[in-house]
Image (spheres, grey):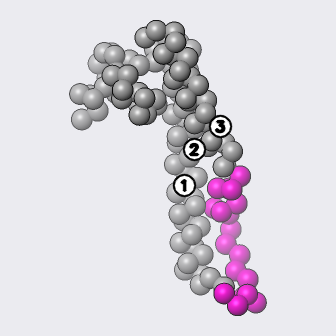
Amino acid sequence: MRPEELEKFRQQLLELREDLLSTSEARDEASGTVHLDQQSVGRLSRMDALQSQALAKAGKERAERQLRLIEAALKRIDNDEFGECMECGEPINPKRLEIDPTCLYCIDCAR
């Protein structure tokens, strides 16, 4: 892969990482302990609050997983291994990487 392409993917990954990190505080707050305001007129039921908390926790876990994938992709760029299938070693189609620069497998091995 050409250095210009690698730099483009590096920038894309850095932007994705920044987006995830910028919203991490809101995810942390939403996935925290449920506190119900019993005095509020439009209060949530306990089930609604717990469901919202579970959804927020799942979102937080997805974001953490995505951050790990981004960091791994950045390491592969640094080690000159980016764009190689982890299974067969063949190049991953650049169009596939444009859609998801963290992908690890070519289309054949991903099946």
Of callouts 1 and 2, the N-terminal one: 1
User: Percent position (x, y) of residue 74?
Assistant: 56, 23
Q: CA distance from mark 1 to mark 2?
A: 9 Å
Q: Earlier in the sequence, mark 3 or mark 2?
A: 3
Magenta region, residue range? 25-42
- Residue that badge 1 annotates: 59
Q: CA distance from mark 3 to mark 2?
A: 13 Å
Element marked by disc 2: helix
Q: Of circles 3 and 2, which is in front? A: 3
Q: Which residue is mark 3?
A: 18
Question: What's the residue at 55%, 17% (across, down)?
Answer: 7
Q: Would you call the spot at circle 1 few (<14 residues within 10 Å), some (14-19), or many (20 or more)? A: some
Is residue 39 shown above or below 103? below
Magenta-drawn stretch contains 30:
yes
Residue at x-position 24% and y-position 35%: 111
Relative to 66, residue 28 above or below: below
- Residue 95 is left or right of residue 57, and the answer is left
Residue 104 in view (yes/no): no
Q: Position of residue 69 (x, y in %)?
A: 51, 34
Image coordinates for residue 102, horizontal then vertical, percent: 46, 31
